[in-house]
Image (cartoon, coloured by chain):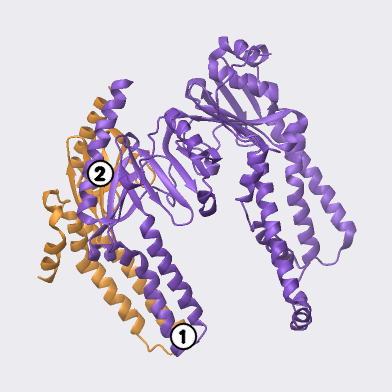
Amino acid sequence: MSEPAIAPVPRRLHPATLVARWLRIVPQMGAAGIAILATGRGTGITFFLLFLAFALAVGALFAFLYWWRFTYVVGVNEIVIEKGLLRRQRRVIPFDRVQDIAVEQRLLARLFGTAKVKIETGGAAKDEGSLDMIAIADARALRDLVRHGPRAADVAAQAPVEEPVLFEMGLARLLYSGLFGFSLVFLAVISGALQQLDQLGLFNWSDWFTPERADQAAHFVTLRLAFILVGLVLALGLIAGVARTAARDFGFKLTRTEKGLRRKRGLFTLSEVVIPLRRTQVALIESGAIGRLLGWYRLSFQTLGADQKEGGVQVAAPFARMEEILPILAIAGFPEPPPRQDFRGVPRRAIVRQAAPALALGALAVAASLWFDARAGIVAAALLVLAILAVLRWRKHARALGDRALFVSSGLLKRRLWIVPYEKAQTIQVSRGPIQRALKLSNLLLDTAGSGSLRSPEMHDLDEGEAEQMAGRLLALFYDARARVRATA
Amino acid sequence: MADEIQDEESAAPAAAMTPLHPNHIWVLAIRAGLFASLLVIAAFAADLGPLRRTPIPPLVLPLVVLALGLLATLVLPRRRYRRWGYKEGEDELEIRRGMVMRVRTIVPFGRVQHIDVAQGPIQRPFGLATLILHTAGTQGAAVPLPGLDHSAAEAMRDRIRAKIRQDLV
């Protein structure tokens, strides 16, 4: 089976690509057709059908051209991809640069027995090399070729090595975890769809929600009906959460490979990703308010140049007990979080900083409610709640300097615990704004590769002197850790 | 005078820092001046046109913008310049900057991916350049150090490069 994979002949994608690409165009064209019809000058159904037929033909032509002009050659040491109709692009990816090959099977791909292959080299480019789609057997052969070299390809194909399983989710736990994924996203989806229709002129809010109708409806709304409605919405939210989780994490399995952790999951879309251990930067343990009470956590790793869809963060265990997470952490080379008493919080005056903006705005809102509009009082109350939340959040923000890593925890309801090994630091940054300066507070950030800018293990509102001191200490720990890593390597 | 008193209060840690080249004040002033004059022109244009339909009396907006522009061009550059400083250590570069938001960044040389020496059109006549250290980090992906003498920036780049090479060995 690996014989054709090595022969250096240009090959095309699986013919099913034609159908897949064509189908991808249809909904857009359909929407465009409806839009034209809606704005349209009443040209009627014949025009619509003609337009649709034309669009489908054009779509088919483009799909064919893409398929026809896309070739790839699997050589002994590299893969060469050539594509593009007018602007030809030839990309050579040497195998020793490839970090990993991710194989993803969407529903349609599974019907055809094909898969999308993503070649990740760890560069900055989003789409470094993807073969969408090739036969599943070819995808596996290519993956084995890259992972084990040309000689091992046959061995690997014939006798798949049993990889030790680190974490697995059975159906019961999967469904249970879905309950925590309670989501009202469907409400947003429905209202979004209605708005879309509104814009297209097929549905009109103001026609529907007239004052008369609201009046009529008000007569129907009894307490019982209201309860039923709320219950229905909640039930739908639960179902949506379970469905979403089940579709994503079905058959979740994390195994240990030679160089990393392999994650397989998915109900409709099967995906297989390897998290290379050498490239993991930061470990993140998250928990929701209710889940934490019941002892459920989620472990993910921030990796360098991994699948950018999830912001460089790969989930390793979506719903697990701490006892299950700790061994995975150990295998990935991250130290265990220290007990709570080893964590240190931030000074009390940080409350002022964190609650000040909300309180200041709240005072303005109170003034506005007195002089202009009483409704501003609602805003004031909301801001007061925000200020209280800020105080509560302040209590949860803490850090600990371990032997090998910095631990930062934050978050009130959704709590995050970052584990940042010292040797992964890229830069160290101390910063303070005007309010912080007045209060002698500072932020401290141990910047790492691949972290999002919104969710980073930045420590907020440390004592100014302490932050400066800690920056120096972190730098020293960074040099020590690097020396240690180099000595073992 | 008032500047100096205020600076003494908050500039204590900057003592051991190397200041930027004094010509950098001119670069900051010209940059601010160009930007401010655009805004002033826009304010005058607005004053002649749309603002006449509002109760705002003539010349109020342009004069306010002009005053702010003069402040940004004549007074602030010197202060902003003073907030900059750097220390080239044995194994890392430390940079302090920022007037409103005070930031101190430490970049270990071992983490530098590549180094740029860039020179903008305003910097060129003053013989200044910006040294940019690129790391694999996120917020610290590119750490700029402006206002260096061009040859000094190049010398610094070569020194850092030599240290990176050592680090790789």
Colour representing chain A = purple
Q: Evaluate whether residue A89 shows in this view.
A: no
Which picture quadrant has residue A218? bottom right
At a point 36% along the width and 54% down the height, the residue shown is A397
Split into 4 quadrants, where in the image is the N terminus of chain A? top right
At a point 71% along the width and 57% down the height, the residue shown is A236
- Disc number for residue A369: 1
Colour representing chain B = orange
Q: Amino acid at mark 1?
A: Ser
Q: Amino acid at mark 2?
A: Ile
Would you say the residues marked 1 and 2 are in contact, meaning their CB atoms lie under 8 Å apart? no
Name the chain under label 1.
A
Residue situated in front as seen by the camera: A266 or A19: A266
Split into 4 quadrants, where in the image is the C terminus of chain A? top left
Instruction: Judge left or right: residue A19 versus residue B113.
Output: right
| Residue receiving disc 2 | B106
At a point 52% along the width and 38% down the height, the residue shown is A314
Q: Percent x, y for residue B94?
A: 22, 45
Name the chain under label 2.
B
